[in-house]
């Protein structure tokens, strides 16, 4: 899914890997916990001689994935141990009084370098979400009020601080290293635990999940704001949960099915094709966007590495209430080796259960989503040149972006020795991450699907330059002896899969039949 979007014709528009940052709303208990060590690491300065805990630097593994984190892992899914502590003003705060809110507790110490590194991130999360009910507490272990005040004021932090003077609370939470951060759900159970600094993205995702922000991730109308960071964090958090529960297909299974289903497509429920409507039935822009969002999905692959998790993202759309959806062949081909999920407009993240049919030459993959309650997009029977169209997709992790234009022509495309296939060219913008997004007519019906771009370059003195030949590198013009290295971009063709090919694939036709049907449909369209 990470191929360059500026290659000729079949330069796929899957999203390139992007580092992700989340946005959350929850009650966070920030627990400064460290792994046992003979002595504090170099990043921890001034540690008191009696300190039983060491600091955990950035890059430490998630608590649920490392045995060294001790018994703190066993808290996940269990009731959070109750406590009552005083804040720096001498007022008592009881966890029991916070039930119904998401709480984040961070165990820390002033002498712990990683604690001081992570506290500003936790404080920022608190500032962002306290107005939506998030509770955050930094629980300091056995230090004087004056020392804690100096540190908090010096770092310009705003989150509330509680004092665990006798280590009783940290012992109840089995804290063995600091910082340790615990997320307590609104029902009073421990939702997640993080040990060490550098877990900001995972923490945000856990908070979003705990707060149940699914209904607010994507707007019901185009008058609200789409929170890209919240969507990214939710997909990461839910993907990791599904991986842990082992409910996703094994890595590589979807890629194998992608190739197998070209020859033997599975039985697919019949999909209705809407009758052509007169232009007087064109949907208002706000209504078209709201309705199209319901059936447009985010397709994501989760990549875990040594530092932070990240996603590759693309687009797709639902075509039946039973969860049949359509995206590009190259989306599954490029990402199927990693855990893959789909996020619906309401924030639900569901497994991609199987590939039902596919056509590499037409760049189509029909997939089965797990679950129920899907809202399909209606399909049209085509769109003539000049027809107004819109594209709804997720360009470069800018989720649910609507662009508008027109059908500018139908042409033929062939690649890697494959037979030529009709393609729809539109003027509506799309880019990396838009692969698989629906192309909609004025009534909100699908008339095509985003596939690729083809850029046309020209150097002022040399005339036309084909990116297929030069690809932005220094190259010799075939018509002269001159050389150049920086051609000028003149035009970008936006290639889409025509609806006729999508319908033929949904009906289980073999690739050759799909191509023949598409050629006939293209000829019919040109004669209108």
Image (tube, grey):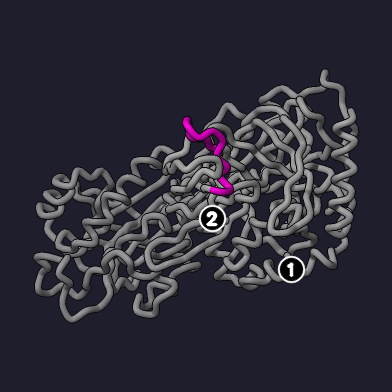
**Is 57 or 406 nearer to us in this picture?**
406
The residue located at (40%, 76%) in the rendering is 66
User: Does 318 lie within the magenta span?
Assistant: no
> Which SS class for mark 1?
helix
Quarter of the rendering occupied by the N terminus: bottom right
- Name the disc covering residue 257, or none: 1
In the image, which is nearer the foreground, mark 1 or mark 2? 2
Name the side, left or right, on which 440 lies relative to 49.
Answer: right
Task: Choose top left, top right, bottom left or bottom right for residue 192.
Answer: bottom left
Give the spatial CA distance, label 1 vs label 2.
21 Å
Q: Is residue 180 visible?
A: yes
Magenta segment boundaries in residue numbering: 457-469
Figure check: 52 above or below 96: below
The first of marks 1 and 2 along the sequence is 2
Figure check: 391 above or below 14: above
**Is 436 or 193 nearer to us in this picture?**
436
- Name the disc covering residue 2, or none: 2
Figure check: 224 above or below 35: above
Q: Position of residue 150 (x, y in %)?
A: 11, 49
**Is 42 or 393 nearer to us in this picture?**
393
Q: Is residue 218 visible?
A: no
Q: Position of residue 480 (x, y in %)?
A: 51, 40
């Amino acid at each position: 899914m990470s191929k360059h979007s500026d290659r000729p014709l079949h330069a796929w528009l899957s999203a390139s890997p992007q580092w992700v940052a989340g946005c959350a709303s929850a009650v966070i208990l920030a627990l400064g916990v460290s792994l046992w060590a003979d002595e504090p690491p170099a990043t921890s300065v001034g540690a008191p001689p009696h300190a039983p805990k060491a600091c955990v630097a950035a890059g430490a593994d998630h608590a649920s994935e490392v045995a060294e984190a001790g018994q703190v892992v066993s808290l996940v899914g269990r009731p959070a141990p109750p406590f009552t502590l005083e804040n720096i003003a001498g007022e008592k705060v009881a966890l029991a009084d916070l039930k119904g809110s998401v709480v984040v507790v961070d165990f820390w110490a002033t002498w712990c370098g990683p604690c001081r590194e992570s506290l500003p991130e936790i404080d920022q999360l608190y500032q962002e979400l306290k107005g939506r009910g998030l509770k955050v507490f930094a629980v300091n272990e056995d230090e004087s009020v004056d020392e804690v005040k100096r540190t908090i004021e010096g770092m310009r932090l705003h989150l509330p601080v509680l004092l665990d003077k006798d280590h009783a609370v940290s012992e109840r939470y089995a804290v063995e290293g600091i910082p340790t951060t615990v997320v307590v759900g609104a029902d009073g159970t421990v939702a997640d635990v993080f040990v060490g600094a550098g877990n900001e993205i995972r923490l945000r995702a856990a908070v979003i999940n705990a707060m149940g922000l699914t209904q607010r991730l994507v707007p019901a109308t185009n008058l609200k704001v789409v929170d890209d960071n919240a969507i990214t964090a939710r997909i990461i958090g839910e993907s990791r949960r599904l991986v842990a529960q082992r409910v996703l297909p094994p890595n590589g299974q979807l890629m194998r099915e992608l190739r197998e289903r070209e020859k033997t497509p599975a039985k697919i429920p019949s999909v209705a094709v809407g009758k052509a409507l007169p232009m007087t039935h064109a949907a208002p822009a706000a209504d078209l966007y709201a309705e199209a969002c319901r059936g447009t999905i985010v397709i994501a692959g989760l990549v875990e590495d040594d530092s932070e998790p990240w996603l590759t993202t693309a687009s797709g759309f639902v075509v039946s209430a039973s969860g049949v959806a359509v995206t590009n062949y190259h989306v599954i081909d490029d990402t199927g080796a990693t855990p893959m999920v789909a996020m619906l407009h309401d924030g639900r993240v569901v497994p991609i259960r199987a590939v039902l049919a596919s056509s590499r030459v037409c760049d189509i993959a029909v997939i089965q989503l797990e679950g129920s309650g899907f809202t399909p997009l209606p399909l049209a029977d085509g769109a003539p040149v000049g027809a107004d169209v819109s594209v709804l997709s997720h360009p470069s992790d800018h989720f649910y972006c609507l662009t508008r234009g027109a059908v500018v022509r139908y042409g033929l495309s062939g690649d890697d020795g494959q037979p030529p296939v009709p393609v729809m060219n539109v003027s509506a913008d799309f880019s990396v991450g838009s692969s698989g997004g629906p192309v909609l007519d004025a009534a909100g019906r699908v008339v095509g699907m985003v596939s690729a771009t083809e850029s046309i370059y020209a150097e002022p003195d040399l005339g036309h330059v084909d990116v297929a030949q030069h690809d932005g590198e220094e190259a010799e013009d075939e018509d002269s002896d001159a050389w150049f290295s920086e051609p000028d971009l003149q035009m970008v063709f936006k290639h889409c899969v025509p609806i006729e090919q999508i319908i033929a694939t949904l009906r289980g036709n073999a690739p050759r039949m799909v191509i023949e049907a598409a050629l006939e449909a293209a000829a019919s369209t040109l004669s209108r």
